[in-house]
Image (cartoon, rainbow, N blue to C red):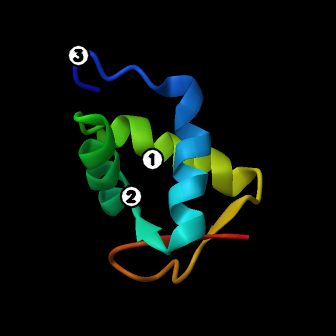
Amino acid sequence: MEKGCAMKGFLEFQVLVMINKKTLSGQQIRKEIGKRKGCIPSPGTIYPVLKELKKKTLIKELDPKAKEKKYKIT
């Protein structure tokens, strides 16, 4: 994550809010956060959050076999 982009505790909530509005990929989530917060979180920050939200069954992949995985809220 870039310097000054501290949002760890808020990230799960933020991702859920974004995915609730429309289905998004991890890359799209990163870009959207960049627009809103002025810094783009690294893939190493976003993808563990997506994995954890999936584990908690709060989100699911639309097509697990697709090249670009998109997520939706459950």
Secondary structure type for disc 2: helix
Q: Secondary structure at mark 1?
A: helix
Q: Which residue is mark 2?
A: 26
Q: Which x, y percent locates residue 68?
A: 34, 74
Crowdedness near tag 1: few (<14), some (14–19) or many (≥20) residues, C-alpha within 10 Å: some
C-alpha gap between disc 2 and disc 3: 20 Å
| Residue closest to the eye, 64 or 14 | 14
Q: Quadrant of residue 46?
A: top left
**Image quarter hosting the N terminus:** top left
Q: Position of residue 23 (x, y in %)?
A: 49, 74
**From the viewer's perspective, is residue 67 above or below residue 2?**
below
Looking at marks 1 and 2 on the same chain, the residue that comes earlier in the sequence is marked by 2
Residue for point 61% across, 43% down: 13
Q: Earlier in the sequence, mark 2 or mark 3?
A: 3
Which labelled disc corresponds to residue 11? none
Q: Amino acid at mark 2?
A: Gly
Residue that mark 3 sits on? 3
Q: Which residue is mark 1?
A: 47
Q: Quick check: 5 above or below 20?
A: above
Comparing marks 3 and 1, which lies closer to the viewer? 3
